[in-house]
């Protein structure tokens, strides 16, 4: 149950889509270009109504596709505008070419992204295949467990993107968060506006007094350096994420970081996951603790830049852990988040027994019983009673 922390905050009942749209209204971007797609349609639909009602002075651009939406957003950002968009699944996939261009041009675009399965077969429900596919496009990625986090993350994302000069996407799990009503604390308009501040671009194509070239061809002599600068910008963004989180806590009272630790101080077995499944996992942890199993959780919030050293340090204390991925890499081996986690451990000289599970594809349910089974096996692995699997395992799927 969300409680009011900020003295001037207001407790309301809203869906994840509604609070993301509300955050966008309070941020008041100069331009929003978007194309509707389930389950993210409501975000831009509600925001377009704010524009039509005169509640926000944003220039809303209705386009014919998601590729055009990102193209228009890039054009607005290059021109010097604070620009935002929203999409999901196939829409994000259709933006693919432009995602890399937005990052390569170092544009601080903010995207509200609702996680949804990729076709085929056609599915409108939630998993993280879409954003995991874009994980190396040069965008900062911030994931949300619930509606409160999606609202807070949107507000922080603007400041993070503009300080890091990197596009940033804030995600929620399709339908589970996007369409479910939750209790959320929203902050006064003037306080959100004061927090994000006025956007002052370093350069803008419309500033004719300071002309510059953008998007020129770069061959062997310069392209590599340009890409290195992008990678270095992502590495430097780690401190910016923490600095903005500190500012946010000082202003509104809620604490954020790269990830949340739940009962990890004395944990012997742990799960690492992203998104709404973390809430279910916390419930299971509380039950298992009563039975004597010292279970813990690391819920990743910021996946790009990946907090490798920090996660390795916190996992070093456990005897066994599992990573729950809501996307499959189809590599015949392991899934995306697991590969990042074990790479972080390896680079830090840490060897811990581990498991990788893929769950929830296409919106498939993951229950408390499923998560409890993972912890039970981890407990046996920690005690040396069974060995970890040598490949990815799948939760709640019919396998012949």
Image (cartoon, rainbow, N blue to C red):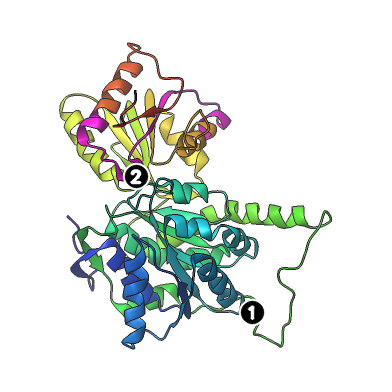
Q: Nearer the viewer, residue 51 or 20?
A: 51
Quarter of the image where one finds residue 319 = top left
User: Disc 2 marks which residue?
Assistant: 362
If the image is split into quadrants, where does the N terminus sit?
bottom left
Residue at (51% x, 40% y) in the render: 308
* C-alpha distance separating marks 1 and 2: 41 Å
Quarter of the image where one finds residue 142 = bottom left
Task: Give the residue furthest to the front.
Answer: 121
Q: Where is residue 326 in the image (x, y as percent from the top left)?
A: 38, 41
Left or right relative to 82: residue 224: right
Rendered view: 56 above or below 89: below
How dense is the environment of label 2, judged by Cα within 10 Å: few (below 14), some, or many (20 and up)? Answer: many
Q: Is mark 1 on a helix, strand or loop?
A: loop
Left or right relative to 392: residue 396: left
Residue at (23% x, 66% y) in the render: 185
Q: Where is residue 187 in the image (x, y as percent from the top left)?
A: 28, 72
Part of the protein shown in magenta: 344-372
Task: Give the residue furthest to the top.
Answer: 385
What is the number of the mark on residue 204?
A: 1
Q: Which of 38 and 146 is in front in this view?
A: 38
């Amino acid at each position: 149950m969300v409680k009011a922390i900020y003295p001037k905050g207001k407790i309301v009942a809203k869906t994840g889509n509604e609070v993301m749209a509300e955050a966008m209204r309070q941020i008041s971007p100069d331009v929003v270009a978007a194309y509707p797609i389930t389950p993210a349609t409501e975000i831009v639909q509600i925001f377009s109504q704010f524009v039509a009602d005169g509640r926000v002075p944003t220039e809303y651009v209705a386009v014919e596709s998601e590729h055009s939406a990102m193209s228009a957003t890039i054009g607005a950002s290059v021109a010097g505008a604070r620009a935002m968009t929203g999409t999901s699944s196939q829409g994000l996939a259709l933006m693919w070419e432009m995602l890399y261009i937005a990052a390569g041009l170092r544009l601080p675009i903010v995207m509200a992204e609702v996680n949804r399965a990729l076709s085929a077969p056609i599915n409108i429900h939630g998993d993280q295949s879409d954003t995991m596919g874009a994980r190396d496009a040069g965008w900062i990625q911030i994931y949300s467990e619930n509606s409160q986090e999606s609202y807070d993350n949107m507000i922080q994302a603007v400041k993070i993107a503009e300080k890091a000069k990197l596009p940033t996407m804030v995600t929620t799990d399709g339908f589970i968060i996007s369409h479910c009503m939750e209790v959320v604390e929203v902050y006064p308009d003037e306080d959100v506006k004061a927090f994000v501040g006025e956007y002052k671009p370093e350069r803008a194509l419309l500033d004719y007094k300071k002309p510059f070239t953008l998007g020129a061809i770069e061959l062997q002599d310069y392209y590599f350096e340009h890409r290195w600068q992008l990678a270095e910008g992502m590495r430097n963004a780690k401190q910016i994420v923490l600095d903005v989180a500190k500012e946010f806590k000082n202003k509104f009272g809620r604490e954020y970081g790269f990830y949340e630790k739940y009962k990890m101080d004395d944990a012997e077995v742990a799960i690492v996951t992203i998104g709404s499944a973390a809430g279910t996992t916390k419930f299971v942890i509380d039950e298992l603790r009563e039975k004597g199993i010292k279970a813990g959780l690391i819920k990743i919030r910021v996946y790009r830049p990946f907090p490798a050293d920090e996660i390795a340090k916190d996992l070093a204390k456990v005897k066994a852990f599992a990573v729950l991925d809501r996307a499959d890499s189809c590599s015949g081996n392991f899934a995306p988040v697991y590969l990042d986690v074990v790479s972080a451990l390896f680079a830090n000289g840490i060897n811990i027994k581990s498991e990788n599970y893929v769950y929830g594809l296409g919106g498939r349910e993951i229950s408390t019983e499923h998560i409890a089974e993972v912890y039970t096996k981890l407990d046996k692995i920690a005690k040396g009673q069974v060995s970890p699997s040598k490949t990815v395992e799948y939760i709640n799927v019919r396998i012949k």
